[in-house]
Image (cartoon, helix red, strand yellow):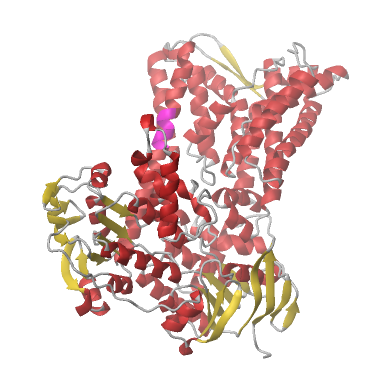
């Protein structure tokens, strides 16, 4: 094909003994929206870095605008109209919007002196390219993720850009913001700009892309037109495993609630919350970001104790004043942001697993019973199949899915009665997501009361037996999962 | 809609400089009311003269803080460079003007700064560790290899330069006089040059970029290693200039006289709103903070605070001042989080 914009031909890349890419070939035409999908570690980022010139391939070559390159330098890549928008957007939080927009092209022009008037002009021009308006003198650090992304996109358009590579651009965006992003992508397509969209989110791949390429363990496993793809094939290509969507149906629900709230209140966050949770049940709580769903979970876990209302555990009234009392009552909480709230990332996997049950593993004078400790760690690594060569490795060496399993292990080691999970599979890839759901089903089957807080509606529908919808701090609907659907839930949420 | 004045005021209220300025003003007024001597011409000249050396040090340390590093080696660097320059000029019986001293000191300062810059810029080592080490190395070379002693006589050019003054201020009440040293011009010149570099050159913006996000800077095409290297050379030269000026003003060289200044200088800069994490802060704020420390060091005696209590005062000022700036930062964070949530709901 003569008119292809970018072609990679049989690209191999290895890092000290690890084969990161094994013969990947893909081709992109101008104005094409192409989705590059794959689980963590499949070689997506390596491929991007080869295309943008950060790495050079060990074998194979790249064709740009019909010209062949064995390897390409970052500057050649930019000159050929390739721009990468990384997940962190490469912005300077300490500088103004104007400088963030203009600095890159000023640097590319090898300027030595700053002309603030020219900078302002460049900034205005670049915003005009996507019809985006924002205060040029605002600090970028004070902007939302979506706004930062718009700045990164308009900045990328300043270089006669023909291909924009977006590395998981929707990770931190809300539904509405994703929609706006897609509109902009479509506009760019009209201008003949090709987009290589890196994602592992199924619905996005279907919604936006025309062509797809899926990598697994460094090899290209499938590519073609998106319309020929369905969700089952997609999951299979991504993971190499077949999944059957299994709705969770609690068997033999006991009649006596393990947990109950009556008229729970927390000023300015939620009011009049009453619900029950039975052992063996998975209860979903969903709602928009400000609906009070997270605050409710934090109240039950004692982080933000409620102002008024009653909590009963196994029928007995209890008062939860702080996290310690919540743990004493066998309540566990897996936070939304596991990286900053749920794990000690730089500590070892084993220490993270046992941190909540330290008291139980000590003999006299607070000294560890190392035998007991080892057994406990082995047990959980095996039970939750955490993929690690050595539990003494630091937590940050693991993928998102495995990290989430450690957060789970930490709580399960405490013999909980009630487990609250906030966004349990945010940022986790398909295979791990499925595994985590499976773990939750098994736990419920063993008689644990599970609460899942999530705005991932398919996840809630698939895993919960009952769904509470929250809006402006109140429960507006109590639905049975088998008799409701996404649109109904959405109509209550909005 | 808000007027532009309101927006400016709002932006200002989130900065540290106005608060430092108000504290500074309050302190000056307090001293004036208690002693009636603060705004006398000779006291103002004394304070300006006392600001020269800390001010120069602050400019250099400020650059490093903006780039996301921290420099604790500048007093040792200045001492080594001032000592070797002075000693060398004495040895060759140099009788000319101050220029030779300044040029030699700048040259030595550039080499010592390049030493820091090599390790921090090109070998990508943490600035605190490197400068702690180089501080010991510089001190060791000066006291061991060069066997430094107090130099009570310094070359005639330096003596004359140290005595020369722009004007003399007289206090009509007490009859005391104070000289405004010519070096104050050197301080102003360095200040103006640094301001120009930071505001109007890509090199200066590059320093802000590196402090804001080093990985973004690399991807944007800032030559990070080279920028850091050159910056540390400049910082070394500024510190050496301060060393020579200090020696000339004191009319003698004392090997340990400048050592230990680093913490108060850095504290002053942080008081003025520069973040230790890099990327944020203004030169104006840094000088304001330094001025505050200089005034506390020099003028507390006017309101009857014994000198032995000085460090208690400075210490409390630093704790209160930095707490305010951290409080400001968290408040700003909360505002932006609220904003984000509001926007997401819409």
From where the camera sits, is residue B244 visible?
no
Q: Residue at left 63%, top 61%?
A: A106
Residue at 65% across, 17% down: B257
Q: Nearest the camera: B128 or B249?
A: B128
Q: The magenta stretch spans which residues?
A: B319-325
Residue A116 locus on image (x, y percent)? 57, 57
Which quadrant, please, contains the C terminus of chain B? bottom left
Q: Is residue A469 visible?
A: yes
Relative placement, left or right, of A350 versus B203 is left
Residue A479 position by quadrant: bottom left
Identify the image quadrant of the N terminus of chain B.
bottom left
Instruction: Work out whether residue A11 or residue B261 is closer to the camera in this orientation and state it.
Output: A11
Does the magenta segment cover residue A336? no
For residue A421, what is the image quadrant? bottom left
The chief SS type of the magenta part is helix
Residue B305 is left or right of residue B141, and the answer is left
Compared with B41, B137 (above or below) is below
Residue at horizontal 66 percent and vertical 81 percent from the top: A7
Residue B43: x %, y % from top left: 52, 18
On the image, the x and y values in percent for residue B322 come to 44, 34
**Residue B332 in picture, x, y percent from top left:** 38, 48
Question: In the picture shown, does residue A324 fall above or below A118?
Answer: above
**Residue at 43% from the left image edge and 77% from the top image edge:** A202
């Amino acid at each position: 094909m003569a008119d292809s914009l970018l072609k990679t031909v049989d690209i191999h890349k290895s890092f000290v003994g690890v084969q990161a890419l094994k013969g990947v070939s893909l081709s992109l035409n101008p104005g094409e929206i192409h989705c590059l999908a794959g689980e963590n570690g499949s070689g997506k980022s390596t491929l991007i870095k080869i295309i943008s010139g950060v790495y050079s391939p060990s074998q194979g070559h790249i064709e740009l605008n019909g010209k062949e390159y064995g390897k390409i330098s970052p500057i050649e890549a930019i000159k050929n109209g390739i721009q990468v928008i990384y997940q962190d957007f490469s912005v300077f939080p300490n500088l103004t919007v104007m400088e963030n927009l203009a600095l890159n092209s000023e640097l590319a022009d090898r300027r030595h002196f700053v002309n603030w008037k020219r900078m302002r002009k460049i900034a205005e021009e670049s915003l005009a390219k996507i019809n985006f308006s924002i205060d040029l003198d605002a600090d970028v650090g004070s902007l939302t993720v979506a706004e930062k992304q718009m700045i990164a996109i308009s900045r990328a358009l300043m270089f006669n850009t023909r291909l924009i590579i977006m590395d998981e651009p929707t990770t931190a965006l809300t539904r509405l913001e994703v929609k706006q992003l897609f509109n902009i992508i479509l506009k760019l397509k009209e201008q003949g700009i090709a987009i290589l969209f890196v994602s592992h989110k199924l619905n996005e791949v279907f919604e936006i892309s025309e062509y797809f390429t899926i990598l697994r363990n460094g090899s290209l496993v499938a590519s073609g037109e998106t319309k020929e793809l369905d969700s089952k094939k997609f999951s299979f290509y991504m993971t190499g495993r077949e999944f059957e969507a299994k709705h969770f149906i609690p068997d033999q629900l006991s009649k006596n609630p393990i947990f109950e709230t009556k008229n729970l209140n927390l000023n300015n966050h939620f009011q009049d919350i009453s619900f029950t949770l039975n052992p063996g049940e998975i209860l979903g709580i969903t709602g928009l970001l400000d609906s009070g769903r997270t605050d409710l979970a934090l109240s039950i876990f004692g982080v933000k104790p409620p102002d008024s209302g009653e909590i009963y555990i196994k029928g007995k009234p209890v008062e939860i004043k702080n996290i310690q009392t919540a743990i004493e009552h066998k309540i566990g909480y897996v936070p939304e942001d596991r990286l900053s709230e749920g794990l000690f990332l730089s500590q070892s996997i084993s220490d993270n697993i046992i941190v909540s049950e330290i008291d139980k593993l000590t003999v006299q004078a607070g000294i560890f019973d190392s035998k007991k400790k080892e057994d406990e760690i082995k047990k959980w690594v095996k039970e939750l199949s955490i993929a690690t060569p050595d539990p003494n490795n630091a937590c940050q060496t693991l993928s998102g899915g495995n990290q989430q399993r450690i957060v789970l292990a930490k709580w399960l080691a405490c013999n909980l009665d009630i487990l609250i999970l906030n966004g349990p599979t945010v940022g986790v890839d398909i295979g791990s997501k499925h595994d985590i759901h499976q773990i939750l089903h098994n736990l419920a089957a063993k008689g644990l009361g599970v609460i899942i807080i999530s705005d991932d509606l398919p996840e809630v529908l698939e895993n919960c037996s009952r769904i509470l919808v929250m809006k402006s701090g109140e429960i507006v609907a109590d639905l049975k999962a088998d008799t409701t659907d996404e649109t109904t839930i959405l109509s209550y949420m909005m | 809609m808000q007027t532009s004045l309101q927006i400016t005021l709002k932006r200002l209220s989130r900065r540290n400089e106005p608060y430092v300025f108000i504290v500074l003003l309050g302190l000056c007024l307090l001293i004036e009311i208690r002693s009636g001597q603060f705004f006398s011409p000779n006291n103002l000249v004394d304070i300006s003269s006392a600001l020269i050396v800390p001010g120069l040090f602050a400019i250099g340390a400020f650059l490093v803080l903006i780039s996301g590093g921290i420099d604790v080696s500048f007093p040792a660097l200045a001492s080594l460079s001032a000592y070797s320059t002075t000693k060398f000029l004495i040895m060759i019986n140099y009788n000319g003007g101050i220029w030779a001293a300044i040029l030699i000191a700048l040259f030595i300062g550039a080499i010592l700064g390049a030493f820091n810059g090599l390790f921090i810029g090109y070998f990508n080592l943490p600035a605190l560790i490197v400068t702690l080490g180089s501080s010991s190395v510089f001190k060791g070379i000066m006291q061991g290899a060069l066997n430094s002693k107090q130099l009570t006589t310094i070359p005639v050019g330096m003596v004359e330069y140290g005595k020369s003054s722009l004007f003399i201020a007289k206090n009509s009440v007490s009859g005391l006089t104070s000289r405004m040293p010519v070096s104050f011009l050197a301080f102003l010149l360095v200040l103006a040059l640094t301001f120009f570099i930071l505001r109007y050159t890509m090199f200066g913006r590059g320093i802000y970029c590196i402090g804001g996000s080093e990985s973004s800077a690399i991807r944007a095409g800032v030559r990070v290693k080279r920028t850091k290297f050159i910056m540390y050379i400049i910082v070394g030269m500024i510190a050496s200039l301060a060393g020579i000026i200090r020696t000339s003003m004191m009319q003698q060289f004392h090997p340990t006289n400048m050592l230990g200044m680093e913490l108060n200088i850095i504290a002053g800069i942080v008081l003025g709103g520069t973040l230790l994490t890099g990327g944020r802060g203004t030169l104006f704020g840094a000088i304001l903070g330094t001025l505050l420390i200089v005034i506390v060091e020099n003028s507390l005696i006017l309101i009857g605070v014994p000198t032995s209590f000085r460090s208690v005062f400075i210490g409390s000022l630093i704790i209160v001042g930095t707490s305010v700036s951290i409080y400001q930062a968290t408040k700003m964070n909360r505002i932006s989080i609220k904003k984000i949530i509001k926007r997401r709901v819409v």
